[in-house]
Image (tube, helix red, strand yellow):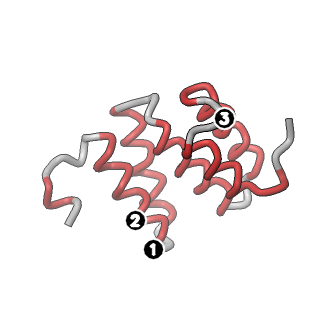
Amino acid sequence: KLHSLGHDDDAAIANLIGYSSRKLGRYDEAKYWYEKSLAADPNFARTWSYYGMWYAEQGNLLKAQDILEKVRSICGTECKEYTELKSAIGGNVVY
């Protein structure tokens, strides 16, 4: 249904397609859509957060932590995007 909107190049739409793909276990497809979202808006904190979760789910906690830092630089440590990603990474955050 998201594809039918005809705005796949919009950061928010591409992010939602990526999120949906990740939740369905389609990790390669999710990565494509997260990267498309970030190409449209490199400072879209929500996509960065979800992309960090994608990396955490892949077992790449170092990359997820790098992305956590990116999210912090965009919206700080109190924003929902930061706190959700930090929680997804769990106690494995290295500062």
Marks 3 and 1 in Cβ contact (< 8 Å): no
Q: CA distance from mark 3 to mark 2?
A: 25 Å
Mark 2 element type: helix
Q: Residue at x 55, y 30 (%)?
A: 75
Q: CA distance from mark 3 to mark 1?
A: 29 Å
Residue 24 marker = 1
Tell me the crowding category of disc 3: few under 14, some 14 to 19, or many 20 or more residues within 10 angstroms, Cα based.
some
Between 72 and 35, the one lying in front of the other is 72
> Which image quarter holds the N terminus?
bottom left
Q: Tell me how many marks there are.
A: 3
Tell me the crowding category of disc 1: few under 14, some 14 to 19, or many 20 or more residues within 10 angstroms, Cα based.
few
Mark 1 element type: loop
Q: Residue furthest top?
A: 73
The mark closer to the camera, 3 or 2, is 3
- Position of residue 64 measured from the top left corner of the image (x, y, whole percent): 68, 46
Marks 1 and 2 in Cβ contact (< 8 Å): yes
Tell me the crowding category of disc 2: few under 14, some 14 to 19, or many 20 or more residues within 10 angstroms, Cα based.
some
Q: Residue at x 42, y 51 (%)?
A: 32
Q: Earlier in the sequence, mark 3 or mark 1?
A: 1
Q: Residue furthest front?
A: 78
Marks 3 and 2 in Cβ contact (< 8 Å): no
Q: Residue at x 37, y 42 (%)?
A: 36
Dot 3 amino acid type: Thr
For residue 44, what is the image quadrant? top left
Q: Earlier in the sequence, mark 3 or mark 2?
A: 2
* 68 lies left or right of 26: right
Residue at the spot of label 3: 77
Residue at the spot of label 2: 20
